[in-house]
Structure formats: structure tokens, C-alpha cells
């Protein structure tokens, strides 16, 4: 809120949502959430162990294990934050962050297509194929096929003397394998490759900065491109930019002669 108010006061415009998300730190949310569910799960577990045996508390026993399990999981996820101080890990996390939105959109499209294959297999092959007898088993079987499990069995486990059903089964599985193991995988690789190239392209990063990064004259967390931030080299960084802690990394300063 302080950043938004200061930006609106200085620039006379509203700070974009993209810039607000750049201020937001996902690791802080993960830490807070893991602490909350760990405390709640611990309180319920202690209540059960110390004789508070109400029906409601006893019914929450399984929920306690789930809460403590998620708390442990999110705590370990928050440890990844410390690896980001290493250059290689920082690059990896930056690529994942940059490609996250595109991956989510692509997964949404693939999910719709996957649902179509599931319904087709259940309706057409379900009466004749044990693996497609129900919607749940169909989803499980297709996911297993995507990972290369029991492909041959799925091709041959047809309980029907109708030749047309066997033909449909082979065509369906062939198209599914080609689409979801070749095309989809290559598209994922292309998405991450593009994000990696953009992450290493300083010109691209400079042209696609948010209004906040343009305002403070920074390309990312370790590079500067304005005389104001370059003044950090001389230990004269303006207090409002709060970038004094970058002064020791003089090798990341761009164009210091400007």
C-alpha cells in the first residue's frame, strides 16, 4: 500500500496489477499458511492425546494428519527460497516464474482436450474394455498411458469379437499417445526454452518491464540501468529506492559511465 500510494503521488497514475504482484512474495504466503495449518493440526492432536474425546475432535483425527502433512510439505517448499541466492538456482526459479502463466493456460487447454478423450473412451470403449469401464478408471488409465505404463495391455485388453471396436481402440490410443506424449511434451519444452531465452536477454527484459521497475530504474533484482541507481556505487543511493544492499554487487551494474 505504501508503494502504491508513493507511486500514485509521484507519477499521477495507478500502479498496475503486474507491479503489485512483483511486490508480493509467494514465499511469505507459503510460510504463513504452513505455520497456521501446523498450529491448528497440533492443537487438535494435543486435544486428542490429552483426553478431550468429544465426537467432533475424534472425527477430526484424519484431518489432523492432513493438516500436519501439508504443514510439513509447505515448510520444505519454503526452504527453496534460500536456494534462490545461488545464481544457477535463481535462474531456474526465474524461468519457472516467467513461464508459470503460460503453462497454466496451456494446461487449461490440454485439460479440455483430455476431458474429450476421457468421454470418448468411456462411451465408445467402456462396454468392451475393462480399463475404460468407468469415468474414474478411464482417467486413471489414460494418465498411466501418458507415463508409459501398461501401453501394450491397454492396446490388447479388448473383450469383444467386434473388429470395429478393436480398430477404434487402436486408433484412439495411437492418437492419444501421439498427442499427449509427443506434441504436448514438445510444447512444454518450447515454453520453458522461450522463458529461458527471455530471462537471459537483457534487451527483452528492459523492453518488457513493469511500470514499477521502470519507475525505480531496475531491470530485475540485480541489475540497474539509470543514473539514479548507479549512484549506489558511490554509496549515495536515495533512501526512497532502498537499494543500498545492492552496492556490493558492482559487477551487475549496467552502463556505469552513464
Image (cartoon, rainbow, N blue to C red):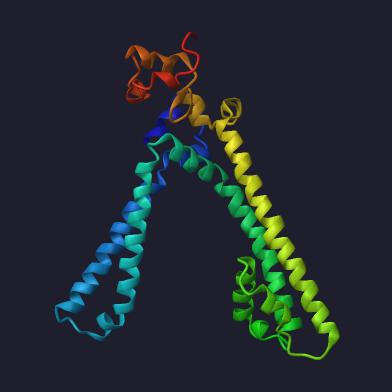
- Vertical order, 206 against 110 (above or below): above
Q: Which residue occupies the extreme top position in the image?
A: 257
- Vertical order, 55 against 170 (above or below): below
Q: Which residue occupies the extreme left position in the image?
A: 50
Please tell me in which quadrant of the rendered image residue 231 appears.
top left
Which residue is at a point 35% across and 20% down the rendered structure image? Answer: 247
Q: Quadrant of the N terminus?
A: top left
Q: Which residue occupies the extreme right position in the image?
A: 164
Please tell me in which quadrant of the rendered image residue 198 appears.
top right
- Vertical order, 64 against 93 (above or below): below
The image shows residue 155 at horizontal and vertical percentages of: 72, 77
Mark yes or no: residue 12 visible: no
Q: Nearer the viewer, residue 129 or 60?
A: 129
Which residue is at a point 57% across and 45% down the rendered structure image? Answer: 99
Which residue is at a point 56% across and 26% down the rendered structure image? Answer: 202
Please tell me in which quadrant of the rendered image residue 236 appears.
top left
The image shows residue 181 at horizontal and vertical percentages of: 68, 61
The image shows residue 83 at horizontal and vertical percentages of: 38, 42
Mark yes or no: residue 160 visible: yes
Which residue is at a point 70% across and 85% down the rendered structure image? Answer: 129
The image shows residue 160 at horizontal and vertical percentages of: 77, 90
Amino acid at each position: 500500500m505504501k508503494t502504491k500510494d508513493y507511486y500514485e503521488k509521484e507519477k499521477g497514475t495507478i500502479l498496475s496489477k503486474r507491479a503489485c504482484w512483483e511486490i508480493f512474495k509467494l514465499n511469505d504466503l507459503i510460510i504463513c499458511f504452513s505455520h497456521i495449518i501446523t498450529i491448528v493440526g497440533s492443537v487438535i492432536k494435543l486435544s486428542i492425546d490429552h483426553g478431550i474425546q468429544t465426537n467432533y475432535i475424534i472425527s477430526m483425527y484424519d484431518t489432523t494428519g492432513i493438516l500436519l502433512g501439508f504443514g510439513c510439505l509447505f515448510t520444505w517448499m519454503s526452504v527453496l527460497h534460500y536456494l534462490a541466492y545461488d545464481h544457477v538456482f535463481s535462474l531456474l526459479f526465474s524461468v519457472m516464474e516467467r513461464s508459470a502463466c503460460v503453462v497454466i493456460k496451456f494446461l487449461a487447454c490440454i485439460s479440455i482436450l483430455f476431458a474429450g478423450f476421457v468421454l470418448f473412451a468411456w462411451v465408445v470403449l467402456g462396454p468392451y474394455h475393462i480399463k475404460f469401464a468407468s469415468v474414474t478408471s478411464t482417467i486413471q488409465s489414460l494418465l498411466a498411458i501418458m507415463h508409459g505404463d501398461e501401453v501394450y495391455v491397454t492396446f490388447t485388453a479388448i473383450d469383444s469379437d467386434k473388429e470395429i471396436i478393436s480398430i477404434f481402440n487402436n486408433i484412439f490410443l495411437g492418437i492419444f499417445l501421439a498427442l499427449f506424449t509427443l506434441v504436448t511434451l514438445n510444447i512444454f519444452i518450447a515454453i520453458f526454452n522461450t522463458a529461458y531465452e527471455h530471462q537471459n536477454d537483457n534487451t527483452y527484459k528492459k523492453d518488457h518491464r513493469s511500470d514499477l521497475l521502470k519507475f525505480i530504474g531496475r531491470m530485475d533484482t540485480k541489475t540497474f540501468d539509470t543514473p539514479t541507481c548507479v549512484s549506489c556505487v558511490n554509496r549515495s543511493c536515495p533512501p526512497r529506492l532502498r537499494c543500498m544492499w545492492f552496492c556490493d554487487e558492482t559487477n551487475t551494474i549496467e552502463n556505469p559511465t552513464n
